[in-house]
Image: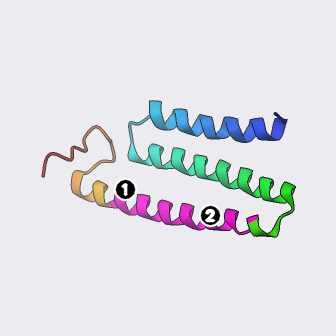
Amino acid sequence: MTPVHFTFSAAFMLGLTGLTFHRTHLLSALLCLEGMMLSLFMALSLWSLQLSATNFSTAPMLLLAFSACEASAGLALLVATARTHGTDRLKNLNLLQC
């Protein structure tokens, strides 16, 4: 495993562990998801550059577009929960209470 691949794998795993163990606020969970998507984007773009194939060149842009859509949906949910519940703590969000 090259150092570049190790760096991207470590960045993805760091975001994954932050998402699993540090889930107190919705904003921190969204930031961990964005870090994971950024590491995937960088790894996929480096992989398509190393292969020098033109059919893989659109995959990083497609992933970046989906990441932007995910970020906007997450921020919309963050604003909606902050308005209705007054906080973004994940412990206060109970889906069974209507």
In the image, residue 14 sits, relative to residue 37, either above or below, namely above
Q: Position of residue 94 (x, y in %)?
A: 21, 43
Q: Nearer the viewer, residue 83 or 98?
A: 98
Circle 1 SS class = helix
Specify the principal SS of the magenta part: helix
Q: Please check the rendered image and state whether residue 20 is part of the magenta-colored stretch, yes or no.
A: no
Q: Which residue is mark 2?
A: 64
Q: Residue at image x 60%, y 52%? A: 37
User: Which mark is nearer the camera, 2 or 1?
Assistant: 2
User: Which residue extends farthest left?
Assistant: 98
Q: Is residue 51 rendered to the left or right of residue 40?
A: right
Gap in angstroms between the C-alphas marked 2 and 1:
21 Å
Say whether marks 2 and 1 touch (CB < 8 Å).
no
User: Which residue extends farthest top?
Assistant: 21
Q: Is residue 67 rendered to the left or right of residue 50?
A: left
Q: Position of residue 54 (x, y in %)?
A: 81, 69
Q: Residue at image x 44%, y 48%? A: 27
Q: Position of residue 44 (x, y in %)?
A: 72, 54
Q: Please check the rendered image and state whether residue 61 is part of the magenta-colored stretch, yes or no.
A: yes
| Type of the residue with mark 2 | Leu
Q: Is residue 30 rendered to the left or right of residue 49?
A: left
Q: Nearer the viewer, residue 54 or 72?
A: 54
Q: Residue at image x 78%, y 40%? A: 5
Q: Of marks 2 and 1, which one's residue comes earlier in the chain?
A: 2
Find the magenta span and give its range. Answer: 56-79
Q: Is residue 74 rendered to the left or right of residue 38?
A: left
Residue 67: image quadrant is bottom right
Residue 78's disc is: 1
